[in-house]
Amino acid sequence: MLKSVGKKNVKLLPGLFRERMETERGYISELETQCLLQNFYLEAGVVMPGLQVLEDPSSAKLHWGWEAPTCQLRGHFLGHWLSAAAAIFASEGDAALKSKLDFMIAELARCQKLNGGKWAGSIPEKYFNKMITGDHVWSPQYVMHKTIMGLADAYADAGSEQALEVLSNLADWYTEWIAETEKVSPYAVCKGESGGMLEAWARAYELTRDEKYLKLAEKYSGAGMFTDLEKGGDPLTNCHANASIPLSHGAAKLYEVTGDEKWLTRVKLFWQSAVEKRGMYCTGGANAGEFWVPPYRQAEFLSATDQEFCTVYNMVRTADFLYRVTGEAKYADYIELCLYNGFLAQQNPYTGTPTYFLPLKAGSKKKWGSKTHDFWCCHGTMVQAQTIYPDLIYFIDEEMNRLSVAQYISSQADFELAGAKVHFEQTSDMKYYNDQAFFDERDDGRMNRWALKFNVNTDKPADFELALRLPCWVSGEVKLSVNGESVQPEIRGGFMILRREWGSDEIKVFFPSKINMQTLSDSPELCAAVDGPIVLAGITDSDCGISGDISRPEEIFAPLSEHTYGTFPWKQTCYRTKNQQKNIEFKPLYDIVDEVYTVYFTHR
C-alpha cells in the first residue's frame, strides 16, 4: 500500500493551488472564536458576553444560517474548522492558527465538563432520543461526526492531547447511549445520517489502538448499502449522495486498521456503482439536488443544482484511498479532474466560501455562500478541501523503493527513501526574477501550464524509482529530459518510470494537451469543451450551439492570451470560438466567479 508523504512533510509553493489554500486560510483565521463556539456554549449554559438579552438580533455577533441557534444542524462547522486549522498548522506551521485551535479545544473541554463530563455537543443529547422514538430530527449524527472528526484531526495533525481526552470522554457517552438504544430500538444507531460515524470511530482506533473505539465502529458497520452492493444491486440511484459516500470512507478505514479484505471489496464495489457504472458530467460530478443521478442519464438532470460540493470532496477521499491501495493511475486522474472542476471551481477565489451546487444548465450563475450567514454543509467541506492538497501529491512505496508523483501541484517535499534524505520540488517550468515569474520569450513551449520541472536533491547518492503520472488526457508526444538529456522512460501502469542513482538532478516534462469535446450518453448532441483535465465554460447566457467537426477542436477554438501580474503572468487555458454564427469566449470553469456561463452546447 502506498503511503502519502503527507502534509507534515509537504509544503505548497507559489501557484494556483497555494493561492486558493491561502484564501481559505485567511477565511478560517478571520472567523471569531466565540461565534465558532456559540452553539457549544449555549448547550453547556455558558452566557456569552453581550448576548444574555438580544434587543436587535440582526446586530448580534453570531453565526447564522445552518449555524443559527435555531437550526438542528448547528455546530457542524466547528469540526471542519478544527480539521482545516490542524492541517494548515501541520503543513505551514501557522502558530497563530495553532493558538486559536488550542483555545477552541480548551473551551470544548470546558463545555464537556459543564455538561457532566462526557457530552461535548453543540446540540442537545435528547436529539438522539428522537431517533429512538421516531420523532423527526435533522441529522444529529452528522453533526456529531464533524466534532469527532475535528477532535481526531486536532490530535493527529496538531498534537493536541486535550482533543484526544475530549474525544475519549465523548466516546464513553456513545458507548452508554448505544447500549441503552440496542435494548429498545437497535436500528436507531444507524439513523440521523450516521454514515461518517463508521470512519470516525475506526480512525480513533487507528490513532490510539484503544479497543473501545473499534467496538463503537462495529456498531455502525451494518449499513444495508454494503449488502446491496455485494448482491450486485444499485443502492445509490436517486438516493442521498452524501449520506452514502462516507460509508465508503468507513469501509476504507476498517480495511486499513483490520486488514479484512471484505472492507476493501466493499469500497471497490461502491466505486463501481458510483463512478464506473454510472457515468459522470465532464466535471466529475454524478449527482443533482444532492441525489445520485440514474446511470448514464446525466443530460436529463442538467440544472442549477448539479454537483453538490460535499460529494466532490468526499469522492476524492474515496479515490485517494483506492489509489493508495492499488497504485492505479485512474484514481489519480479522477482526483485531478475533481480538483480543477470542483475544489477550485466551487470555491470563491476572493472570499473562500463555496457554491453549494455547481450549475451545469445553459445560462448558469454560481450562487456563493456568505462568510457568516449560510454555513451550508459545503462551507465545512470547502475549508477542509483547500488544506488536503499536500496529502494528494507524493507517495512512497517502500517495497518497490519508489516515489510516485500523483498530482502536478507546485510543491516541495522532504522524506527518506533508499537510505537517504531527499528534498524534492516541482514547479511550473518558468524563469524567476525577483520572485516574479517569466517565461523565456524565445521558447513558446514554456507558455504552457503543463511544462513542469522537478528537482531532486539527496544527502548522499540514492538509487530509487521516480514514477511520474502520465495523465489520461495527454495528446501527443511527451517530452522528458533528465539533466538536459532527453530520455525515454518505461511506461508502467499509467506512470513514467525513471530508475537511477539520484543526487542533484533536474527533470523536465512537457505534457501536450488539446481540447476534447465530451458528450453525454443520453443526449450525445450535447458537448462540453475540456482542455486536459480543465472544463471550459462559454461566457454566454444560452446554448448558442457549436458547429463544425468536434473531433478537430483546433478548427473551432483559437487560443486567447493576456499577460497579467498575478502568480502566473498570463491567463491560462482561455479561448475564443471561430467560424461560428456567434463567437464567444471560453475560460476555465474554475475562473468563473460572477459571470453567466454555459458548459454544454448543442453540436449542430
Image (spheres, grey):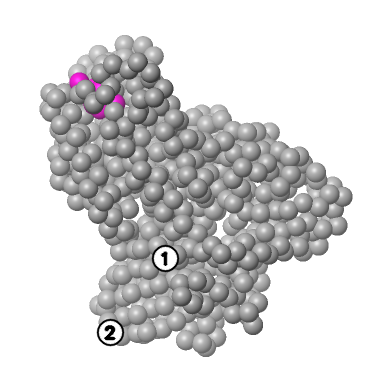
Q: Residue at x 53, y 75 (%)?
A: 430
What amino acid is labelled 1 in the image? Leu
Q: Which dot marks residue 159? A: none
- In the image, taking residue 161 as reference, residue 489 lies left or right, namely right
Q: Secondary structure at mark 1?
A: loop
Q: Quadrant of residue 218?
A: top left
Q: Residue at x 54, y 31 (%)?
A: 291
User: Counting other residues with Cα less than 10 Å from the Cα at mark 2, is it few (<14), some (14-19), or many (20 or more)?
Assistant: some
Q: Residue at x 28, y 49 (%)?
A: 97
Per the image, is 43 magenta?
Answer: yes
Q: Is residue 454 above or below residue 298?
A: below
Give the magenta range.
39-45
Judging depth in this view, the residue of 287 and 217 nearest the camera is 287
Which badge, 1 or 2, comes first in the chain's sequence? 1
* Camera sees residue 456: yes
Q: Residue at x 20, y 34 (%)?
A: 108
Q: Secondary structure at mark 2?
A: strand
Magenta span dominant secondary structure? helix
x, y (%) of residue 405?
A: 43, 67
Tell which tag, 1 or 2, sits nearer the viewer. 1
Which residue, given by chain and number where applicable, does mark 2 sit on? 460
User: Counting other residues with Cα less than 10 Å from the Cα at mark 1, is it few (<14), some (14-19), or many (20 or more)?
Assistant: some
Q: Quadrant of residue 599?
A: top right
What amino acid is labelled 2 in the image? Lys
x, y (%) of residue 478?
A: 60, 75
Which residue, given by chain and number where applicable, does mark 1 sit on? 13
The alpha-carbon separation of the residues under discs 1 and 2 comes to: 25 Å
x, y (%) of residue 471?
A: 55, 64
Circle 1/circle 2 CB separation < 8 Å: no
Q: Quadrant of residue 135?
A: top left
- In the image, taking residue 65 as reference, residue 452 lies left or right, namely right
x, y (%) of residue 380?
A: 40, 38
